[in-house]
Image (cartoon, grey):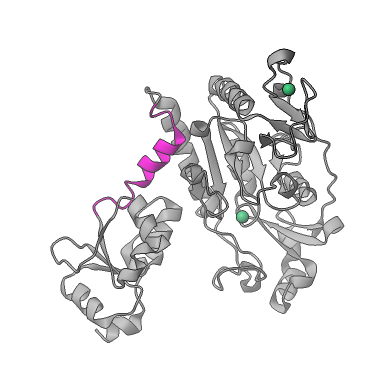
Amino acid sequence: MTVATCNSKSRASSSLLHTPSADGDSCTHPRVIGEECDNCGEYVGPDYGFYFGYMLEGLRLSPGEAARLSEMETRRLFKQKKLVLVLDIDHTRVHSVADKDLNTEEKSFLLENGGSLNDCLFTLESIGLLVKLRPFARTFLKQVSTMFEMYLYTRGERRYALDVTELLDPEATYFGDRIISREDVPAGFKTLDMVLGHKNSVLIVDDTESVWPKDKENLILIERYDYFAKKSTTTSHRYCENGTDESEFAGSLAKVLKVVKAVHEMYFESITVRRRNVRFILRLLRSSILEGCTLYYDNADHEANRVCLMAKEMGAKCSMERNSRTVTHLVSFEDDTEDISWAVQEKKFLVNPWWIAAAYYSWERQQEEEFPVADVMLDSS
Ligand SMILES: [Mg+2]
Ligand SMILES: [Zn+2]
């Protein structure tokens, strides 16, 4: 196992912030350091405007100033044919665990195989964490860096964010001072208000949707990466204890790379301003994935379920009734044998709900046969 030592980088202040001051008489307090206006010195309190402390200690910008700088930044990047990409860390690009939380299977696997993982498994000694990079993480960064200005945005601590950045970006070429961590996220949720860039030109890649309550339209949800058993949400993907890993070239980051490339291309090919909008493009791409499918769920309560909303976002119609003429798929949550018999008889596709989630993460309709309802249910039909 390789031990990498990480030193924190000093925060560089962005050149964008050196803008002319407003006239003292009619100061709109565009920039605040701490709790006082940087221009007129007036006290404005601790909750003023939007927080940009990750760029310069204590910096806050008025909404107007943030919008002005975002506009400038978007224009500057447009000339370089770039958009902004905001990346989460945990379960998106890495999975980290404290040494003490490894289970017996993991310990013995790492003892025997740690050497072969020396370019993707690291120990952060200062905070006692073991960090496993997701397969394709470095390739992903290299490829998107020509198309996007990148931010790291995590609810983890700054110390940890800087250490992980050093593992992913040892030459410090990708992120600069654009690293937003727990100390910068007073509200607890994540917001693009802290990112310089027009919302029409910013993409987010994160494994958690709920942390982006205001900016879900910019989000590309990625399947959660669980390498270790601790904090894993599924039992099937505990790669370490099973001695396996996610596929590098057919895995989640490779799939997301295709999507961000497609969005970038469509954005810069767009002739109208309305279409030069990542929110519009994501909606458009997503809404064609299950076009032509009409789904019937074997439990109406699940209509409100997240998975049904996903299906609708992907262009599927959802039928409230078991209509032989219109329904194309029975999505089986409930093992209802009567519904299953109906689907078999009517020659409808019969899938488990994961068929929908898998399409949502892959941005592609999946082979129905790969998502069967349990064999035992089919036997009884
Ligand atoms: Mg995460
Ligand atoms: Zn002022």
Q: Quadrant of ligand 2?
A: top right
Vertical placement of residue 121 versus 336, above or below: above
- Please tell me in which quadrant of the rendered image residue 103 appears: bottom right
Front residue of 55 and 116: 55
Q: Position of residue 16 (x, y in %)?
A: 69, 22
Instruction: Report the quarter where the C terminus lies.
Output: bottom left
* Position of residue 358 in the picture relative to residue 3 (left or right): left
Front residue of 283 and 131: 283
The residue at the point 42 percent across, 28 percent down is: 276
Q: Position of residue 71 (x, y in %)?
A: 56, 23
- Please tell me in which quadrant of the rendered image residue 43 appears: top right
Front residue of 88 and 197: 197
The residue at the point 39 percent across, 26 percent down is: 270
Q: Is residue 285 magenta?
A: yes
For the question of whether residue 143 can be seen, the reply is no
Vertical placement of residue 30 versus 307, above or below: above
Please report the bounds of the magenta region as a residue range: 274-292
